[in-house]
Image (tube, rainbow, N blue to C red):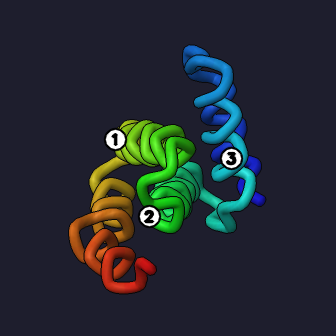
């Protein structure tokens, strides 16, 4: 569990309750110690779940959570520095998305 990511999320303006709940769910499951990478891991996990759900209506909330978490990962990394931003972009960049699509059902 990434305490850093959870603390980072709690310090931000609250998203709508259902979206916030999903973001916290995915952030709690991340295992990176630093908030930027943990938020990136959370985003990928949410996106993977959205892909698994396919056309189901519930996929939309997971996709919104993934989008918000990628944005927050980049914001958190920008606050740390260039190296953190490079790590986040490596973790959640096009290559990571391509791997998810390759593994999608």
- Which is more N-terminal, label 2 or label 3? 3
Front in this rendered view, residue 43 or 58: 58
Whether residue 82 is visible, yes or no, is yes
Q: CA distance from mark 2 to mark 1?
A: 28 Å
What residue does disc 1 label? Answer: 78
Q: CA distance from mark 1 to mark 3?
A: 15 Å
Q: Position of residue 46 (x, y in %)?
A: 53, 55
Quadrant occupied by the C terminus: bottom left
Q: Position of residue 58 (x, y in %)?
A: 56, 44
Q: Residue at x 57, y 50 (%)?
A: 35
Numbered circle sitting on residue 51? 2
Front tag of 2 and 1: 2
Residue projecting furthest to the front: 56
Q: Is residue 57 above or below residue 41?
A: above
Front in this rendered view, residue 102 or 75: 102
What residue does disc 3 label? Answer: 4
Front in this rendered view, residue 68 or 54: 54
SS under mark 3: helix
Question: Taking 70 as reference, is 26 left or right?
Answer: right
């Amino acid at each position: 569990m990434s305490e850093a990511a959870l603390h980072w999320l709690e310090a931000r303006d609250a998203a709508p309750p259902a979206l916030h709940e999903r973001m916290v769910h995915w952030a709690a499951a991340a295992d990176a110690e630093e908030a930027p990478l943990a938020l990136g891991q959370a985003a990928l996990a949410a996106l993977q779940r959205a892909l698994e759900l396919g056309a189901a209506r519930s996929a939309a909330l997971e996709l919104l959570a993934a989008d918000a978490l990628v944005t927050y990962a980049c914001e958190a990394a920008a606050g740390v520095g260039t190296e953190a931003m490079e790590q986040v972009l490596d973790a959640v960049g096009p290559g990571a998305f391509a791997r998810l699509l390759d593994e999608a059902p």
